[in-house]
Image (cartoon, rainbow, N blue to C red):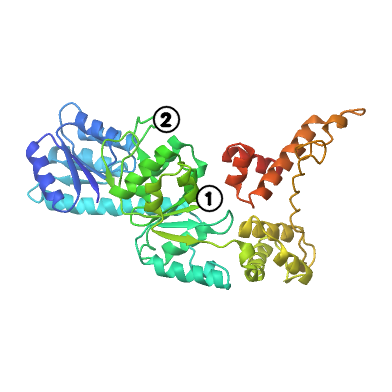
Amino acid sequence: MANILVCDDERSICELLDIALRRENYRVETVNSGEAAKRKIDGALYDVIVTDIKMPNIDGIEVLRYAHQASPDSAVILITAVDDLEAAVDAVKAGGASDYIRKSPGLVDEIKLAINRALEKVILSKQNFALRRDAATRNSLDNIIGVSPAMEKLKQTTRTVASTNSTILIYGESGTGKELVARAVHVCSPRDTESFVSVNCGAFPETLLESELFGYVKGAFTGANQNKRGLFEVADGGTIFLDEISEMTLPMQVKLLRVLQERTVRPVGGTREISTDVRVIAATNRDLDGLVAENTFREDLYYRLSVIPIRVPPLRDRREDIPLLVNHFLKKYAPAAGKSILRVHPQALDSLCGYEWPGNVRQLENTVERAVALEMTDELHVELPAERPKTKAAGANGGGAMPGASSASGAILPEGVDMEKYVAQIERSLLQAALNRSHGVQTRASELLGISYRSFRHLMKKYDV
């Protein structure tokens, strides 16, 4: 449902347009001055603004300029009389106004047509934004690679639930391909012609996540210089994928729950609700049942999200799919690297199939990409990731020392020690030990080390773990 703002100092015009546009199922607000229009623009997001040009104090051209700065996504339609027609034409030519309508007996019908044209451009702009944000090609079931019973069951479930509008919660370890499944659900659904918008809930602090999801109005916070549509509005008619939903804070969980219940969003700093028709697919690599029991995840939100639960199996539980995946990644990366690698060495393939893959398909892909980059022949040889060292048992060297710290007392003398390298070695060992203990689940590993998930990811990147 489009949001329309009508501004005209003639109350009869406002009342006429209010009645006519509401019959077209638009949400309409009317004001009788340019000052009031500017205040409305500051407090809400409008798809179309219809304003008369000739008004006392602040005229329609000034309203147009203000809207162009504060709410650039809003289309502006000017209502003009004969004596100010030139100003309206100039505004359209300059690119500020979408259209102009001369006051005449057919005013209402012409404004309806102009609004329809403007909304078509607004919808196209939203779709283009989503396409720019998500440059990856559309994925379908064909992109979910695997013929194992577990994957065939997953594909069948995806086909079955795609035709519904129910909320889906996807479970799976890190790197199993949860977003790929979400995209497949979207592409197989009646919403496939609309936007698929993906957002990682663990990548934003609470305040930034709220404005990213719900949008904001000018002046809502420092740096909010213009109105901005949220991702829920961008995804209207389509699908929004909320990855790492378990990382969302409790206050944000309350706000998301309200969106799921009411099917409306309120931009940060805004004064009105915006209706949305969005299918929500969430994903997590953590045990939400356990988080609910620990009171770190809301039980009511959990039930709202898990209407249809889907579990993506880890790679170690479908080893028969590894040769298919290796071949897929080889075909993907060899041409990109300008290499003619025809096959995988049998011994290398046996090693790949026997490895545990704590990082799942993502780790396998990275391993193949690295092997392709280093290969000098037409046959792929693969060096498996180093086994993560086990933590030493308590008392093995005098009682529960940290990994890598057993020789700390003697390492300084007599020749000294490179303290920076030594500390880095300890930190890297701790990261590997935590990942080994948590079976590759990074959020759990960060908890074992008592650091934030963001700090954990930073250290992994720093030490190339």
Q: Quadrant of residue 38?
A: top left
Which amino acid lies under the numbered mark 2 shown in the image of this protein? Gly
Numbered disc 2: secondary structure: loop
Front-most of residues 105 and 35? 35
Front-most of residues 260 and 94? 260
Q: Is residue 255 shown above or below 117?
A: above
Q: Looking at the rendered structure, which numbered label has been put on residue 223?
A: 2
Which amino acid lies under the numbered mark 1 shown in the image of this protein? Arg
Decide if residue 179 is on the left or right side of residue 353: left
Q: Looking at the rendered structure, which numbered label has been put on residue 170?
A: none
Numbered disc 1: secondary structure: loop
Q: Residue at x 60, y 47 (%)?
A: 442
Q: Is residue 156 shown above or below 123?
A: below
* Residue 407 visible in the shown view: yes
Identify the residue at the far top of this view: 57
Q: Residue at x 50, y 71 (%)?
A: 153
Front-most of residues 336 and 54? 336
| Residue at image mark 1 | 286
Decide if residue 42 is on the left or right side of residue 306: left
Q: Position of residue 248 (x, y in %)?
A: 46, 42
Front-most of residues 376 and 291? 291
> How many other residues sit within 10 Å of disc 1, few (<14), some (14-19) or many (≥20)?
many
* Residue 229 visible in the shown view: no
Identify the mark nearer the N-term, 2 or 1.
2
Decide if residue 460 is on the left or right side of residue 304: right
